[in-house]
Image (cartoon, rainbow, N blue to C red):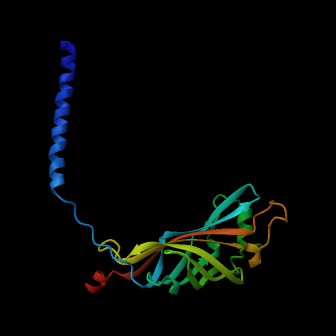
Amino acid sequence: MSHTIRTVLRPFAAGAVAILLGMHGPASRAADTAPPAMPAITAPTAGVYHLDKSHASLLLRVSHMGFSTYTTRFSRFDATLTFDPDNIPASKLDATIESASLEMDAAPKMCLDIVKGPQLLDTVKYPQIVFRSEKIRMTGAKTFEIAGTLALHGVTRPLVLTATYNGGYGGMPDMDPHARVGFSAHGSFKRSDFGMAFGVPAPGTTMGVGDLIDLTIEAEFSGPALKAAAASH
């Protein structure tokens, strides 16, 4: 190796050794100090749970002239759940949706007026959409069907949701001092069954807005206070 090359590389070699020594010291000290232990996670308790609106979504999908599956959502809704993780079939669910909260991003005013006006949702006359469970049937260890009624546009009809219990916990001290559970659910219905047939394509065509509405629900619920936290008050 020439004298010139050795002269150029010498500072880099010294710097590399310094970096390695510097990393070794703090790393060794960090390894000797164990991180704080996570609090023990307990199972969620039975009781009344309320929707955590910051961790919930209600999406709707419908065919638009057969060209695309238009996706929209309701932005204002609430739900109360009576839940026992050891006896899911005994659960009860009541959910209310503000019909005027249907969001149609970038939709022209004409479309909004039709969807929210008398031709379809008629949100002034029917401000709420309500789902109430009537029976829950287990289909797997954590999957089930929720049979209930959907009150929409002045019509009440049966609706079945397929759902999955995604798990939960009894709470986390100083972070989430209440029990929490989470679910995913899916269902569908024909809007014409609820007196909203405006724009449904003629038989054999797709020119219009589809009759079948597909629902996707993701929801977390906050429930009874963490036992340790409740005992300390």
Give the x, y percent position of residue 116: 70, 71
The quadrant holding residue 20 is top left
Name the residue at the top extreme.
2
Give the x, y percent position of residue 97: 60, 77
Examine the rendered structure and indicate whether residue 126 appears above or below residue 217: below
Name the residue at the right extreme.
203
Q: How many marks?
A: 0
Could you tell me which quadrant the C terminus lies in?
A: bottom left
- Left or right relative to 131: residue 165: left
- Left or right relative to 76: residue 196: right
Examine the rendered structure and indicate whether residue 80 appears above or below residue 11: below
The quadrant holding residue 43 is bottom left
The quadrant holding residue 216 is bottom right
Q: What residue do we see at 80% from left, 70% from top?
A: 198
Of the pair 158 and 111, the residue shown nearer to us: 158
Could you tell me which quadrant the N terminus lies in?
A: top left
Q: What residue do we see at 62% from left, 82% from top?
A: 147
Give the x, y percent position of residue 53: 49, 72
Give the x, y percent position of residue 191: 73, 73
